[in-house]
Amino acid sequence: MADLPSGFWSGWIIVLTLVSLAGVAWLSISIYFSKDAETQADHEPVWDTDLKEGNNAPPMWWFWMLFAAMIFSLIYLMFFPGLGSYSGLLNWSQGSRVADSYANYEATFADSRQVISDASLEELQNDLDLMATAERIFTRECSPCHGPDGRGQAAMFPNLHDIDWQWGGTPEQIEQSIRQGRNAIMISWQQMLGNDLDAVTEYVSLLSEGNNQSHAGKAGYDQNCVVCHGPTGDGNQLLGAPRLNDDTWLYGGDIDSIRMSLTNGRFGVMPAFDQRLDDVQIKLLVALLAR
Amino acid sequence: MSGLSLHKKIEENAGLLIFGILFVSAIGGLVQILPILNQDSLSTATENTRVYSAVELTGRDIYIREGCSVCHSQQVRPLIAEVERYGAYSRAGEFVYDRPFLWGSKRTGPDLHRVGGKFSDDWHRIHLIDPRSVVEASIMPAYPWLADRDASDTGNISAKLSALRILGHPYSDEDIDNADADLQGIKEIDALIAYLQMLGTGYSEGDSS
């Protein structure tokens, strides 16, 4: 993956770099150690027949600084990539540095990660330190949507600490929610329900109270909504269809919000974290949420 | 000849002095810049990198207009801390269709190069209109007007695509003909979100390069 220059341009870089270095070396050495350094005056430009600038020799420590810099460049160019396609004695690259960091990380944390992999969810849940770690992961990855304490926000991102699970609250189901993400699909019912929309809206808002058998919206509900939300509004975790007969609402339980859900449809998206988090991190999150 | 006599010659001859200054300052560029301009591997797109669609390109222009790059960089550096936080570090080949690059140099907010797919469109919409409604302590400014303005008023999109085609971006005649129609009926915020959602999707772990 080394992206070093090759062919003609490699030679071009090597020659220019080394020639410049040699040029600077020659220039500084010849100025500081020239045999006729004492007769500096002879080398001074003379303007208008007798006007001289009166140059002083630069101080010696300047030379030593320059000299040290040149030695440093040579050593640097020997060990690190810099001379065209030559990758240096250390074979260092930015990509290999990341790989090394990860190898180092694996080596340092392999044991504690193994402990987490082997532990049961209960053991993890009882370990306050690990739960604090899980909360940090949650804050970083999940809180922009689910809120800082995971209690949901913006009438769009669900509370993860209640007993009401849209997609299921078993560890396996939670893990799937995190790994694969969730795409809820409920289309708009405006067309289908037509004039019944208001009646069905009201019926839904009354589902939690039972005793609504003679309601005008029941027919519309039974015809269109039962497949997903169930005859009594219990919902269906396989489809992510939420329970409608309780007080917990994702998008709001007042008449206006329910009407909005039916008019516009709802398409909640939970992104997949399979790629962003590793197995141990996901396990910790599952333990945190399944508490 | 010693450095001292060379010094005398150069100081007495203004033309030589000017040439000398130009030559010495050019060396850095000759070593650092010229070879890179000729290094094909750096200007070859990674496998999944594609040109911006008309909508994404408009979103990108809005991103530039609103100064998002003042607070957000678009380059994940090859360091473990960054890879852990943002995702795979940025590859040169992912930026071949960026004119100009939006790498940025200041991170008041997080890096955005791998933000594509990290959030849902809905989240971006809420967050852009009022960041504080989802991230309590956010100091990012709100951009409510993006939801009111038509994306098609942002500029002549087909002319932009044609200009980019001259620069070698592979847009087809069809892309250019359809560009105006693609922007009909959507707001600026939709275009910006489309752009954010495709950021950093040109590379996935395991691709070559």
Image (tube, grey):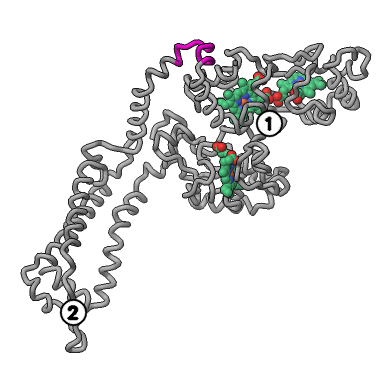
Residue that label 2 marks: A54
Question: Percent position (x, y) of residue B17?
Answer: 26, 73
- Does residue A206 show up? yes
Given residues B111 and B202, the one toward you in this image is: B111
Disc number at residue A153?
1
Secondary element under disc 1, as helix, strand or loop, is loop
Secondary element under disc 2, as helix, strand or loop, is loop
- Does residue A271 show up? no
For residue B134, above or below residue B12: above
Q: Is residue A258 left or right of residue B28?
A: right
Disc number at residue B68?
none
Q: Residue at x 53, y 11 (%)?
A: A122
Q: Residue at x 47, y 23 (%)?
A: A278
Whether the magenta-drawn stretch holds residue A195 is answered as: no
- Separation of marks 2 and 1 at Cα, in angstroms: 77 Å
- What is the magenta range? A116-126
Q: Residue at x 66, y 26 (%)?
A: A151
